[in-house]
Image: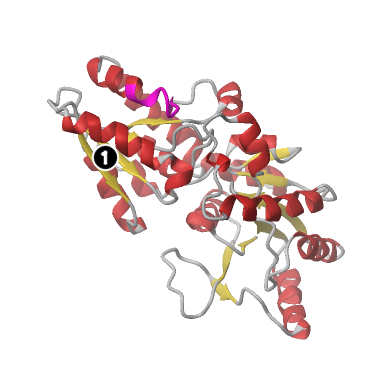
Amino acid sequence: MLIGPTNTVGQGSSWAAAVQTRLGIPTEVWKASLPEKTYPYRVDRMIQPEIPEERERSVLVDDIAKRFTHVINESGQPFGSARSMRRVIQDAYSRRLRGVRTALLFHGSDIRLPSIHLAENPDSPFRHSNDGLTEKLERLVSARRTRLAFWVGTTFITTLDLHRYVGRATWLPVAIDPSWFMPARSIDSEAARPKLLHMWTRREFSHSDVIDQVCSRLHDSGLVEYRSVSGISPDKVREQIIWADVVVDKVGFGATGVFAAEALASGRIVVGDIGARARTILPEHPVIDATTSTLDGLLRDLVADRSGWAAQAAAGEAFARRYHDGRYSAAVLAEWMGVPVKQP
């Protein structure tokens, strides 16, 4: 199997490891990247984002058809071309004639249409331009969804809220490294000042300004010890999470991803917002939902009554192990590929 060409947040690498371990199927991850750029995740091959000569790109396409039986195209991006969904569908059709199955996969912002999100989420960050990002995503995603209407194959999504944007989609949960399930410092429900952590990449999508304001007030009043960080390399993220008792993820956004899964696996209380659609599908989801208007009161109540912390942390660990240690994702891919899952 081949996964690429974005390997967003290293997820292609994580799924490949799960497939090889659980299914015994050789899997490669290809990443489109400029030669001078460093990359923190393991991949099997770096390819040019755009191969200008059609003959050279044809060689790449032919190599894929010869070497792989199954291909997952991430984010509507073809291999070796900056052109989007139209080329992806053409490549998939060409591979199918040669017996190769193709699936599409979307991670989030690559298919989440801002105008729909804004209409259905009072806290949507898309009510602002965000330096032109909102308009850019609206344009790109709208065109992508138009092409997606002609797709009749399998489509995977990594977060359950994306069912709203992709019809007939199959949930392929994010998978995290086994090291996240190693023993760690237990949360301290008796601490005089519980430790709160917020880690952000896109502040506007996480409502980080609001989170910082709320948590800083709690910090200044002596209720908690608060840390807000960004730009942490992947190998240092666990160190930050283990420091915390409570992790505040994105609030008011209606989706959660890799970071929340890692925090749950580490036995941390996670405050975020999984969204109504995900809550309906998985009512037992251990992330505690919050919005920008409820966050302050929720955190104060959480700190005031810690009697359920141990049970909440244990439920989070169990949930992460069930859905995010790679076994569930491997089983989803096994069903698509028509192969059995190896027993441990």
Which residue does the image show at 22% across and 41% down from the upper left? Answer: 243
Near mark 1 (Cα within 10 A), the count class, few <14, some 14-19 or many ≥20, is: few
Q: Quadrant of the N terminus?
A: bottom right
User: Which residue is nearer to you in this view: 268 or 194?
Assistant: 194
**313 displayed left or right of 187:** right
Quarter of the figure with residue 277? top right
Give, as a three-letter code, the residue at label 1: Pro
Residue at numbered disc 1: 183
At mark 1, the secondary structure is: loop
Which residue does the image show at 80% across and 60% down from the upper left? Answer: 89
Q: Position of residue 172 (x, y in %)?
A: 60, 42
Q: Position of residue 103 (x, y in %)?
A: 72, 53
- The magenta-colored residue range is 287-296
Report if residue 290 lies within the magenta region: yes
Q: Main secondary structure of the magenta part?
A: loop
Residue 248 visible: no
Considering only vertical position in the picture, is 179 above or below 162?
below
User: Which residue is nearer to you in this view: 219 or 341?
Assistant: 219
Considering only vertical position in the picture, is 276 above or below 321?
above
Considering only vertical position in the picture, is 311 above or below 327?
above
**275 displayed left or right of 314:** right
Report if residue 168 lies within the magenta region: no
User: Which residue is nearer to you in this view: 144 or 35?
Assistant: 144
Q: Position of residue 115 (x, y in %)?
A: 67, 40
